[in-house]
Image: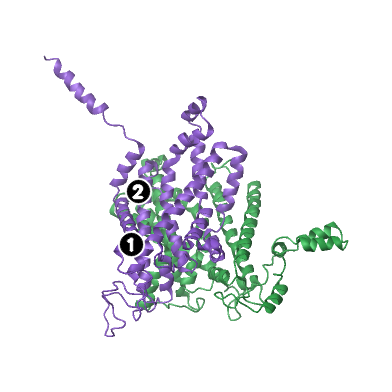
Chain colours: A green, B purple
């Protein structure tokens, strides 16, 4: 428990740094959220100034020495001066964040970022929002990866050096090497342009459940291939263990040996793989979302960057970093749970 | 006379057993690598790409930036239609893009960018990662703790998102214009991706520095720097080589992804410049024409798949060859 708390506390500086760096780089970028066209980067200066004031963008980025000086000159005392010194965009953002507010979106005027992420359009079920679209895609892809990768790895491992092994390993290596967005290009061209089985631009994924299959499958492929390789290696290692020989020697049926001894033990490295896999699939899905025109947070992220929608970018960077941190943590926890020999929190 | 024969025999036997040349780990590994069909195939593909990249101006039928009016959106030469303006021409073997530029020539010039993007960040990553991992492992204690905490933080960064932010933010500034934007790409990749190497090297150093030969070196008064460079580094080299082989395709893929979503290498404007285009840029140009002109996407996609596969097979083979204990593991 102490270990868990310590690890959760370690996440805070990480997330803080992610926010700090994202904030710094985004504000260092030329242009701003009010530009009409990202190419020309021009807007009416008067309007821009008013918008800046309304959204607090006229404040300094990190520190506000002028306000602090003014507070001191007006005789408001040192605490007030320090407060005014921190009256800058970054700290105001953090203050809102601690209260659970991601701030107003600059692109969808009048809406809060949390509404954009977690609220569904009026004609949808309440859970059909951007965040759940990405989550569903990630979960489906993880499911596909397990359903494809695990059996393939087991077959290869149990039949080492046979044709089944060679073929599985070859396909696993090939699909591990081919990036999924390139695969997506081929599949969209084949199934969309040539065969016409899928819509090139699917407008409503929530209305048509079949439409999720191809994007989720494509997203899962490299993970499935990697999982197959991992499973194969794991099965091979477990098969050489003494307890497997003992199980055979005492006359257990092959079926019992495989199911109860080999598979169960070869699951250990695979279970630890799933947490990060889900996180990677969620974080890595933005290009698949863009390709398949899924309205999820990944696509929102890419669009927000080019539109300089600072608050949305910060929220999504935070969300992604949080996913990765949780995934890393879950590996350590699951390891300790599955294999009590590994003691948590002692050295590395 | 009779007792001579066994003596001669034993000399021959001795020669056979004891005069075999000693082989180093790397010669052994090289021999093992050459026996791996996948790796040999991969190496052949990579060498071919390297030749194409080096001699691009000689091989490419056109300059990658030359615009041929009235020749936009031509299909590959084997696609013949009744309309001569949209029919394939042998002059443009793989067709032309929306501006009327030759796709084959663009693909050939793009090879340069991809290979450079693959190798330069890899060298930077290995350098940064090895230095930090070596220092952390060698000095241990507080230095180790500090460096590894820092590594953990960088490791938890959503890397792809960081690249997008950094490149979008800086590509209009002077940093983003160095080397047609390649410099920014190198820096962005290197800043984030060294953590894996650092962790790996640190682990190696931690185990190697307890060995007797390091103690021996220390006892004859070798300095810390000498021990790191002459003893710890050579003995940690094998896993570093394996991991660097996997870094190359990672960076190539990254360039393609960034190009595809429109934040990749800046398209060159000077036809004499060395890096005229990239496969990522070609993907971007093909993206919007996916329905009508799919070959614009297919060409770079096939090339990317091919080179990534080649490097994956080489990396697999290197790992099996350098670390036989790891054979078959992921």
Is residue A42 rendered to the left or right of residue B110?
right
* CA gap, disc 2 and disc 1: 29 Å
Q: Nearer the viewer, residue A327 or A65?
A: A65
Q: Is residue A274 visible from the viewing direction of this image? A: no
Residue placed under numbered mark 1 in the picture: B56
User: Circle 1 — which element?
Assistant: helix
- What percent of the width, then of the height, locates residue B305? 37, 62
Is residue A63 rendered to the left or right of residue B268?
right
User: The C terminus of chain A lies in which quarter of the figure?
Assistant: top right
- Chain at tag 1: B
- What percent of the width, then of the height, locates residue B3? 14, 14
Q: Which residue occupies the extreme right position in the image? A: A75
Q: Residue, x 33% and y 63% (percent of image)? A: B57
Location of residue A168 (image quadrant)? bottom left
A219 versus A123 height, above or below: above
Residue placed under numbered mark 2 in the picture: B317
Q: Nearer the viewer, residue A1 or A180?
A: A180
Q: Earlier in the sequence, mark 2 or mark 1?
A: 1
User: Circle 2 — which element?
Assistant: helix
Q: Nearer the viewer, residue B153 or A155?
A: B153
- What percent of the width, then of the height, locates residue A160? 32, 49
Disc 1 crowd, CA 10 A, few/some/many (<14, 14-19, 20+): many
Q: Are marks 2 and 1 on the same chain?
A: yes
Q: Is residue B270 visible from the viewing direction of this image? A: yes
| Foreground disc of the pair 2, 1 | 1
Q: Residue, x 55% and y 59% (percent of image)? A: B158
- What percent of the width, then of the height, locates residue A145? 44, 61
């Amino acid at each position: 428990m102490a270990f868990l708390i310590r690890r959760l506390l370690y996440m805070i500086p990480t997330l803080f740094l992610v926010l700090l760096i994202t904030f710094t780089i985004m504000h260092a970028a030329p242009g701003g959220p009010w530009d009409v066209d990202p190419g020309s980067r021009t807007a009416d200066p008067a309007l821009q100034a008013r918008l800046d004031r309304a959204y607090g963008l006229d404040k300094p980025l990190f520190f506000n020495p002028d306000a602090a000086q003014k507070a001191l000159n007006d005789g408001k005392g040192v605490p007030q001066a320090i407060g005014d010194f921190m009256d800058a965009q970054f700290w105001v953002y953090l203050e809102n964040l601690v209260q659970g507010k991601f701030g107003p979106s600059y692109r969808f005027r009048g809406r809060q970022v949390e509404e954009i992420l977690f609220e569904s359009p009026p004609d949808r079920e309440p859970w059909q929002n951007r965040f759940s679209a990405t989550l569903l895609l990630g979960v489906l892809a993880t499911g596909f990866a397990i359903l494809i990768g695990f059996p393939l790895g087991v077959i290869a491992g149990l039949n080492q050096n046979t044709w089944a092994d060679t073929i599985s390993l070859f396909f696993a290596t090939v699909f591990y090497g081919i990036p999924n967005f390139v695969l997506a290009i081929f599949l969209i061209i084949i199934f969309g342009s040539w065969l016409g089985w899928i819509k090139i631009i699917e407008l409503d994924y929530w209305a048509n459940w079949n439409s999720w299959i191809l994007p989720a499958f494509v997203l899962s492929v490299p993970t499935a291939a990697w999982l197959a390789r991992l499973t194969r290696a794991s099965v091979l290692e477990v098969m050489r263990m003494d307890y497997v020989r003992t199980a055979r020697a005492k006359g257990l049926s092959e079926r019992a040996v495989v199911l109860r001894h080999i598979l169960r033990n070869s699951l250990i490295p695979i279970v630890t793989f799933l947490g990060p896999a889900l996180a990677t699939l969620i974080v890595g899905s933005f290009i698949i979302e863009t390709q398949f025109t899924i309205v999820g947070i990944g696509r929102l992220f890419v669009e927000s960057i080019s539109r300089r929608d600072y608050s949305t970018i910060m929220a999504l960077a935070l969300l992604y970093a949080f996913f990765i941190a949780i995934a890393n943590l879950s590996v350590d926890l699951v390891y300790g749970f599955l294999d009590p020999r590994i003691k948590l929190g002692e050295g590395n | 006379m009779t007792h001579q024969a066994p003596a001669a025999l034993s000399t021959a036997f001795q020669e056979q057993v004891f005069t075999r040349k000693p082989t180093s780990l790397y010669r052994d590994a090289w021999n093992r690598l050459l026996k791996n069909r996948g790796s040999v195939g991969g190496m052949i593909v990579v060498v071919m790409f390297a030749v194409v990249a080096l001699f691009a101006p000689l091989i490419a039928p056109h300059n990658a930036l030359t615009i041929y009016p009235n020749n936009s959106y031509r299909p590959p030469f084997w696609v013949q239609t009744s309309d001569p303006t949209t029919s394939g021409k042998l002059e443009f073997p793989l067709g032309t893009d929306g501006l009327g530029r030759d796709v084959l020539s663009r693909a050939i010039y793009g090879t340069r960018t991809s290979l450079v993007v693959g190798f330069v960040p890899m060298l930077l990553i290995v350098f940064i990662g090895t230095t930090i991992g070596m220092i952390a492992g060698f000095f241990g204690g507080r230095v180790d703790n500090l460096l590894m905490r820092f590594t953990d933080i960088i490791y938890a960064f959503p890397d792809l998102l960081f690249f997008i932010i950094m490149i979008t933010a800086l590509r209009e500034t002077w940093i983003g214009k160095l080397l047609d934007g390649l410099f920014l790409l190198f820096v962005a990749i290197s800043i984030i991706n060294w953590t894996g190497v650092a962790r790996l090297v640190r682990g190696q150093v931690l185990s190697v520095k307890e060995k007797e030969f390091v103690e021996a070196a220390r006892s004859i008064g070798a300095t810390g720097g000498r021990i790191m460079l002459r003893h710890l580094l050579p003995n940690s080299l094998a896993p570093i080589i394996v991991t660097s082989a996997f870094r190359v395709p990672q960076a190539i893929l990254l360039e393609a992804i960034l190009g595809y979503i429109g934040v990749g290498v800046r398209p060159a404007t000077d036809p004499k410049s060395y890096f005229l285009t990239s496969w990522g840029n070609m993907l971007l140009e093909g993206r919007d024409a996916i329905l009508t002109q799919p070959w614009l996407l297919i060409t770079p996609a096939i090339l990317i798949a091919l080179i990534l596969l080649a490097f994956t097979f080489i990396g697999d083979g290197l790992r099996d060859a350098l670390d036989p204990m790891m054979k078959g593991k992921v």
